[in-house]
Image (cartoon, rainbow, N blue to C red):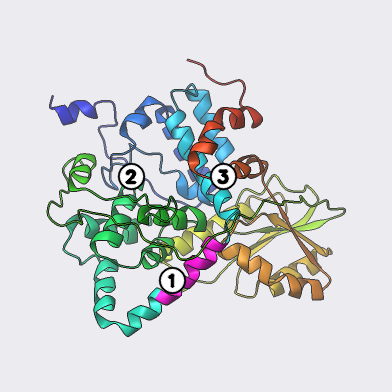
Amino acid sequence: MTQIEDLFADLPDHPETVAFEPTRQAGLARLESFASRTGTQYASYRNYDLGPAQRSTVSVLSPWIRHRLITEEEVLKLTLARNSPSAAMKFIQEVFWRGYFKGWMQQHPSVWTSYQRGLEAAQNGLERNVHSKVDYQSAIDGRTGIACFDHWCHELKDTGYLHNHARMWFASIWIFTLRLPWELGANFFLTHLIDGDSASNTLSWRWIGGLHTKGKTYLARPSNIAKYTQGAFNPVGQLAQSAPALIDDQEHPFVPLNFVQPSIQGDVLLLVTEEDCRPNFVSKTQKNTLGLVLPSEPDIAEKLHAFKQGAVVDAVTHSSLQGSVVATHDWAAAMITAAEQAGTTQILTAFAPVGPIATKLESLKSDLAMAGMTLYQQLRPYDALTWPHATKGFFKLKKMIPTLLKDLGFTDVKTH
């Protein structure tokens, strides 16, 4: 047996592809199949990207968690039923990373608006500079001549997913080798990744470029790529050899969390959006359920749009009450109509963190108020526990993980 074969001896010896079906049932099935690998096996192999035909090294649960078809608590519960906290700590930390990003962005919301302004400026810049536009088009078409980068570009567009290590390499090459604006790369990810969300995507790209942890950048190295792709790629002589940190000329002030959970009397219309497709934790006095999605857009990949819409449909279909899913830009009109049909003036939805859906919901409050209706948002207990610890780097939250697990009720867990 060769050294490489010996390294992967305890992984499945057959192809392991993952079909991203936007249903809770599919997410639970993947969780069940991977839970036993969340311990030392995950810690040993998680950095290896063996390609879309062999996803045995990582859980690939992020699309279902992102849209909360399955929840972080469900993932942690099954993980701790199969492994001790110490054995599964690397995987547990990865689960909490998403909460860290969301909590940090919620407390620094200007980062999101700054990114949007930067994206608009970068897109306008492409129209003014033909050479930059050609370079950008070559990058998103996978025609740079850097084999690994071009492969990941096509893989992203074909599957809607990339291994986390590949995302880091891709972003580093985009910023430091191709010298393209990071905002354009972040937008490319956000319009194709079926697990992409405003916080984790924006802050990860900022971290690569040295903006999140100021001055600390990530440089993709040929030797690292060769090692963790098992020699599939080795871009010697093609990549930048230094990664000077980008500079952010804007300060992003800390905004304290101030969540007031709604105290609602009487019946409500339950609203389901792509942000939370498992809203079983909200008020139990629903009269009806409404799912809202945005129509398909030319700049949003079809796989991403289909997953978002499918997730909302799945949530509404399995609701205990009758409901419908509407694809429209006019969410206010759809909500008013549904609430009137349900005979209520109160609409309740899961809290939408900083991002497009939060912006959308905020923009329609005045229209709802004019119709005599009120929109309430309810924060998940998991987020309420996790987000307050996301004030600095991840290390601060990481130290709190044992306490957070206890606070979440995981006291009777596997200890050996």
Q: Characterize the local packing of mark 3: few (<14), some (14-19) or many (20 or more) Cα atoms within 10 angstroms.
A: many
Give the residue at the far top of this rendering: 416
415 vs 192: above or below: above
Q: Characterize the local packing of mark 2: few (<14), some (14-19) or many (20 or more) Cα atoms within 10 angstroms.
A: few
Left or right: residue 253 versus residue 416 is: right
- Per the rendered image, the range of residues in magenta is 110-121
Q: Which kind of residue does numbered mark 3 sit on?
A: Ala
Mark-to-mark CA distance, 2 and 1 = 34 Å
- In front here: 381 or 105? 105
Q: Which kind of residue does numbered mark 1 sit on?
A: Leu
* Residue 192, position as x, y percentages in the image: 40, 62
Which residue is under mark 1?
119
Which residue is under mark 3?
390
* Residue 196, position as x, y percentages in the image: 46, 56
Dot 3 or dot 2, earlier in sequence: 2
Instruction: Indicate which label's residue lies in the foreground, 3 or 2.
Output: 3
Dot 1 or dot 3, earlier in sequence: 1
**Which quadrant of the figure has residue 57?**
top left
Dot 2 or dot 1, earlier in sequence: 2
348 vs 334: above or below: above
Which residue is under mark 2?
17
Give the residue at the far bottom of this rendering: 128
Residue at (38, 54) in percent of width and height: 210
* Residue 281, position as x, y percentages in the image: 70, 44
Residue at (71, 75) in percent of width and height: 333
Q: Characterize the local packing of mark 1: few (<14), some (14-19) or many (20 or more) Cα atoms within 10 angstroms.
A: some
> Marks 1 and 3: CB-CB under 8 Å?
no
Res 154 seen here: no
Instruction: Indicate which label's residue lies in the foreground, 2 or 1.
Output: 1
Please state the total of marks drawn on the protein image: 3
